[in-house]
Amino acid sequence: MKITDRKKKTRLIVKNGHQNIVLTVSDVAMIYIKERSVFVVAHDSKKYQFSKSLTDIEQELDADLFFRANRHTIVNINFIKAFTACECNKLKVDMKIHVPDTEIIISQETAPLFKTWLSES
C-alpha cells in the first residue's frame, strides 16, 4: 500500500500525564513543537503531549483540513480566525483558540500556498 493510498487518521491518541486520551481529528485545532516536544491543542485550548513527529503526523492527516504552516506548526482550517500580512510578505495567523507563547508565522514562500488552500478547501 502506498502512503498516498493510506486512510487518513480520524483519531489521535494523546497523553495527559499517565493517561492516554483519544481525540477525534475534528477536535484538533493545531499541533506544534515546543522545546523538542510535540503538543496537540484541542478545540477547548487544552494541550496534550504527542509521541509522533510533525512530519509523520502531517502525512497521516487530511490535507484539506490541516496545513503545515511552518517547521513548528500544523493548523486546522476550522480553527483559523484570521491572518494578517506582516514584514516581507509573511502572514501571521490568528486562531480561534488561545495558546500562550505561540505565534504562527507563514513564510513569504508558503503564503501563496496557504491562501490557495484556505480558498479552495
Image (cartoon, rainbow, N blue to C red):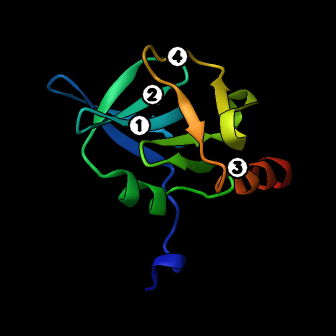
Q: Residues within 10 Å of mark 2 (few under 14, many from 20)?
A: many
Pointer 2 and pointer 1: residues touching (CB < 8 Å)? yes
- For the point 51% across and 35% down, the residue is 30
Tell me residue 117's x, y (percent). Answer: 75, 54
Q: CA distance from mark 1 to mark 3?
A: 18 Å
Mark toward the start of the polypeptide (4 vs 1): 1
Q: Amino acid at mark 4?
A: Asp
Q: In the rendering, which numbered label is found on residue 32?
A: 1
Q: CA distance from mark 2 to mark 1?
A: 8 Å
- For the point 38% across and 51% down, the residue is 54
Viewed as shown, does residue 72 lie left or right of 13? Answer: right
Q: Is residue 97 above or below residue 12?
A: above
- For the point 60% across and 47% down, the residue is 107
Labels 4, 1: front one: 1
Q: In the rendering, which numbered label is found on residue 92?
A: none
Q: Residues within 10 Å of mark 1 (few under 14, many from 20)?
A: many
Mark toward the start of the polypeptide (4 vs 3): 4
Residue that label 2 marks: 41
Residue that label 3 marks: 111
The secondary element bearing badge 2 is classed as: strand
**Residue that extends furthest to the right in the rendered view of this protein:** 119
Q: CA distance from mark 4 to mark 3?
A: 27 Å
Tell me residue 24's x, y (percent). Answer: 50, 39
